[in-house]
Amino acid sequence: MSIMVPSKTPALITPGQQALDSALHQLNHAAAHLGLDDGLRTMLATPRRSLTVSVPVRREDGRMDVVQGFRVQHNVSRGPAKGGIRFHPATDIHEVTALAMWMTWKCALVGIPYGGAKGGVAVDPAALTTIELERLTRRYVNEILPLIGPEKDIPAPDVGTDEQTMAWIMDTYSVNAGYSVPGVVTGKPMTLGGSLGRTGSTSRGVQIAALSALGRSPEGVTVAVQGFGKVGALAAQYLSDSGCKVVAVSDVTGALYAPGGLDVAHLRAWVAETGGVTGYPLADAMAHDDLFELDVDVLVPAALEGVITEANAPRVRARLIVEGANGPTTPEADEILAANGTTVVPDILANAGGVIVSYLEWVQNMQAFSWSSREVEVKLRDLMESAFAEVKSLSAERGLTLREAAHVIGVGRVAEAHSMRGLYP
Ligand code: NAD
């Protein structure tokens, strides 16, 4: 058997193909380290189920648009598939497959009983009205309905989706079932069975990972954050609350630099009011790409994949990169960063806080029960810190980067599940 690896021709490769290429590269490296046979490695490289759907949307002016949607279940050997839904114009089946694969290793790494999935719709949500967005969400959910369910596949928010999207998904699924099914989706509003602590959970995990990796007082540690959305803005907030000095942030509207440190809460209020960081009066504007090359202690990419590449990695001066985003660093950049002594806390560890609290939300839903924010926070911290310690210790023991060690643990657990279950028939 052979693994389908997308062509590497730079001129033809899409960002989604680049992401899948990176994910397969990481898997192959871990599989070789674990000594997995080629059949099992191929199985782990191949999604179990992959669905492409057409989603017709009636616009408010009467026109009908048709957009493509995807849901990929990469692996379900350790439990139901789990993963967010992304609304972004550039998403494609390759990107969604890569993101689903990373979800599989992430869930295994932090020890929660899920497989990996991801969904996407190739659309710019900012170009739709709220009514159009609701119609799009409901129709997309209807198209992927046979795949999802609280025991099968549980979506959550990702880029371009939020609590409201999750509420529409929960409602669409429930109307079809004939009764309320809160456990079909996580990241829901509290009133529909959301969990305390879910909103900031990915960012809280980024903070825990960053402070664990720093290994020293965060007081005065300088931080740059790319992406000021759900993950990046609260990661900046929590790191600032810990004593770090957030000196640069960016979003799709612009990039800001304030060498004396940003008042993150004030900037968040500005963004809530204006829709983006651009024009913020208490910082200097900066070119987007310059953020990666700032002389800071910690860099937190929290936007999209493939932003730290062989082109800019040689100029990265941060000693620590904590990946809030999925797949922000290419394998070529990883090699350069490792050679330069930059520590990278990989996505499948650094941003696992979101799926950990999603799991806690689902457990509460399945039991019709709720935990206090303190209980949620303690469980999140325990799982993050023990995963971090395991990765760090394996990395030291075997001379692996943190990414390699995290993949060896995650891929190893999924491979073990396959071996124990055996192959049907
Ligand atoms: P979001 O849509 O809330 O925010 C994305 C942010 O990135 C926005 O501020 C956007 O303006 C910015 N952005 C987009 N392109 C940019 C560019 N070229 N330069 C600078 N900024 C840019 O999405 P999110 O949920 O915060 O997700 C961000 C990343 O974190 C994604 O990789 C996602 O897969 C990952 N992630 C999210 C969660 C979660 O719980 N939401 C969990 C784990 C991982």
Image: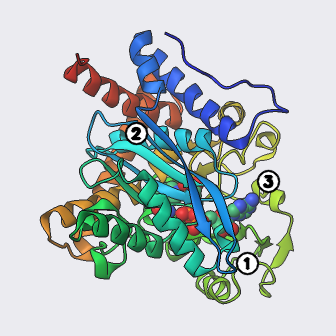
Q: What residue appears at the point 40 percent right and 39 percent down from the top-left corner? A: 104
SS state under label 3: helix
Q: Which residue is mark 3?
A: 293
**Is 314 displayed left or right of 103 in the figure?**
right
Give yes or no for contact between labels 2 and 1 (Cβ–Cβ under 8 Å). no
Q: Quadrant of residue 332?
A: top right
Q: Tell me if the residue at label 2 has its CB under 8 Å from ligand 1.
A: no
Q: What residue appears at the point 84 percent right and 77 percent down from the top-left corner? A: 284
- Earlier along the polypeptide chain: callout 1 or callout 3? 1
Measured Cα–Cα span from mark 2 to mark 1:
33 Å
Front position in the image: 226 or 298: 226
Q: Amino acid at mark 1?
A: Val
Position of residue 105 measured from the top left corner of the image (x, y, whole percent): 41, 38
Is any part of residue 334 visible from this angle?
Answer: yes
Q: Relative to 213, is 418 above or below?
A: above
Q: Amino acid at mark 2?
A: Thr
Is any part of residue 234 visible from this angle?
Answer: no
Q: Relative to 421, is 53 above or below?
A: below
Give yes or no for contact between labels 3 and 2 (Cβ–Cβ under 8 Å). no
Q: Which residue is mark 2?
A: 104
Q: Which residue is mark 1?
A: 277
Position of residue 194 measured from the top left corner of the image (x, y, whole percent): 31, 73
**Is 260 displayed left or right of 358 in the figure?**
right
